Amino acid sequence: MPAPLSSASPPTPPSPPVSSQLPPRAPSPTPAGCSTPRRTGTSTCGTPSSASMPTPTPNHNLPPSPSTSGCAPRASRRTTTHVADAEQVFLGTAGASRTVVSWTAMVAGYVQNCFFGEAIAVFGAVGQEWLTAGEMVHGFALKLRFDANVPLLNALVAMYGKCGSVLSAKGLFDGMATRTLVSWNTMVAMYEQNSDGVQAIKFFRRMLTEKVGFDCVTLVSVLSACARSGALETGKWVHELARSHGLDNDARIGNVLVDMYAKCGEIAYAREVFDSLREPGVVSWSAMISAYANHGEHQEALKLFSLMKGEGVKPNSFTVTAVLVACGHSGLVDEGLKHFNSIAMEYQMSPTLEHYACMLDMLGRAGRLVEAYEIIRGMSVQPDKCVWGAFLGGCRLHCNLELAEFVANDLFQSGSNDVTFYVLMANMYFEAGMLEDAERMRRAMKEMELKKTAGHSSVVRTSTERGGITR
């Protein structure tokens, strides 16, 4: 457990545990002639389960094997044992040692032996760089004539969405002969998760036009899209739609409504929704506290946090982040330190990089830069660019060029080429009248082809709502 933070005692929290497990496995299609899914018990075709593997949870979205598929011949004891052995070797490999080659090999093993559920489940833990492996799963599904199975197609659409291949997901959806509500929900969620809130809203309107219907899952995605795109009037319309269908009492709808109204600047509406919740959970409390903290109502945020603890609700990582933001922006540094210390001492959590960045921003604003640097030195996790950026930002705010130079030189010598550090140092040199050094930073950026991402604003407008500005 880390020691409490103070100017004399930097924290040394334990590193958060890193999971070394595969994503939860869903059951694969049952081979023709078998009475139970493979590897979940002894089947009538004589395939025993692997005792060392966890029992899959039922998932009705996975396709049953057609009698003509090529899976049944592969469902032999020898093949099943080989797949289980491959899993054991893979799980025994340290996380840092796993590469795209080892992940792809594991996916290929699943697919070639018709464990489509396990293969697709892998994509819950991977990103865009795994698109090639996902396309391989799709190709095998086509080869084995699963291309008409709606649940499998839904899973493939979701996979393409998670890998950022929006056009492939849309093409697959458009080519589906039969679509279910899950198919439509997957597309709405896919657009929202890929930061295209406008298209997600358009897709929802198309659902209503085609009389597909909707459920809580649909509305959560649409309201999240409204929050992302600043579409307040559409959000209000969806809220009324939920109320008229008796869905506004669902906790998931309540949570996303609080978030949507807060991000659109309507704090009073957000609080009204929050107060209407029968039993708000930690997500609801965190969303409302964050709403107050991000809109400058810091005392309200801290008051609500006290009320939350009085109700016996245990904070989570997001709650603590919102509280630290409120303390930082209101200058309550000592109270912020108290809440930071409570992460490990009272809530038995490990501080995250975001918590550290908030703490350093808070100390930087207050000019307590040496204390902030000692906290960084005491971190048991590797500081990221947000942590260092918060510290250097504090140095710039209080014109402490000497300390900023000391830290920046260490970062540059260690091979850090983040453009943010070069821009901050160039600006600090310029403000101190050290034009040659400022030019040296800019020249280094040019030689390394580092470019600062420009900020931008956009106006999102539909025919039925006022524009919302997002940044």
Image (cartoon, rainbow, N blue to C red):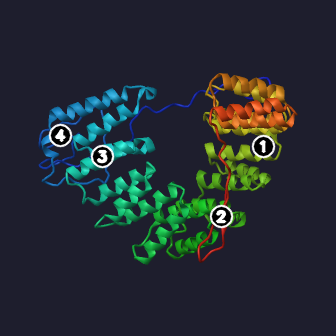
| Amino acid identity at mark 3 | Val
Image quadrant holding the N terminus, namely top right
Circles 3 and 2 in contact, beta carbons < 8 Å:
no
Mark 1 and mark 2 lie on one chain; the one further toward the N terminus is 2
Residue 390 pos. (x, y %): 73, 37
Residue 102 pos. (x, y %): 35, 31
> Under tag 2, what secondary structure?
helix
> Under tag 3, what secondary structure?
helix
- For the residues marked 3 and 2, what is the alpha-carbon distance in whole angstroms? 40 Å
> Mark 2 sits on what residue?
261
> Under tag 1, what secondary structure?
helix
Image quadrant holding the C terminus, namely bottom right
> Mark 1 sits on what residue?
328
Mark 1 and mark 3 lie on one chain; the one further toward the N terminus is 3
Frontmost of labels 1 and 4 is 1
Q: Nearer the viewer, residue 415 or 79?
A: 415
Residue 123 pos. (x, y %): 39, 44
Q: Is residue 290 above or below residue 50?
A: below
| Amino acid identity at mark 4 | Thr
The total of numbered circles placed on residues is: 4
Residue at (31%, 32%) from the top-left corner? Answer: 87
- For the residues marked 1 and 3, what is the alpha-carbon distance in whole angstroms? 48 Å
> Mark 3 sits on what residue?
137
> Mark 4 sits on what residue?
42
- For the residues marked 3 and 4, what is the alpha-carbon distance in whole angstroms? 27 Å
| Amino acid identity at mark 1 | Gly
